[in-house]
Amino acid sequence: MSMDVDVIKEGINSLIRGGYYKNREKLLDDAFRTMLEVRPALKTEMAIELYKGEKISLSRAAEIAGMSTEGFKNILEQREIKRIVKAPSEDKLKKGVELIIG
């Protein structure tokens, strides 16, 4: 069931004009959330893509996907996606060493 782009645009505008949504952003937010409820597997796919693009951390990606960090790590491993591990900054390392050594 495909809808013409013009019909979709007019439908969006009519829902806003009718007061069902305050603005386009609110409507799209609701539509996006509904899509993720209807197709929950997309949460995992979205989390993976955001993680691969270094937009979010591993723990945040797991949270979005609705699974444990270990579960998300397993998904990455199954798909042969390399985990992103960032080393602490030099300044942070020096402070850590100073804290330990004194």
Image (cartoon, grey):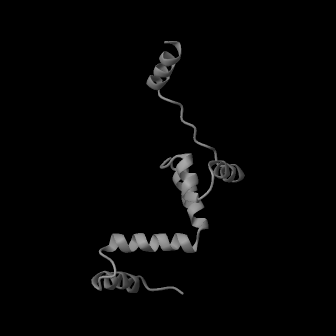
50 lies above or below 85: below
Q: Nearer the viewer, residue 63 or 5?
A: 63
Q: Is residue 100 left or right of residue 14?
A: right
**Splitting the image into 4 quarters, where does residue 41 fall?**
bottom right
Residue found at x 33% / y 78%: 21
Q: Nearer the viewer, residue 55 or 33?
A: 33
Q: Residue pushed farthest top?
A: 102
Residue found at x 53% / y 17%: 100
Point out residue 10 in the picture as x, y percentages from the top left corner: 34, 85
Residue found at x 51% / y 85%: 2
Q: Please give the count of numbered marks on the rendered protein.
A: 0
Point out residue 62 in the picture as x, y percentages from the top left corner: 58, 53
**Splitting the image into 4 quarters, where does residue 42 fall?**
bottom right
Q: Is residue 91 left or right of residue 41?
A: left
Point out residue 36 in the picture as x, y percentages from the top left corner: 53, 69
If the image is split into quadrants, where does the N terminus sit? bottom right
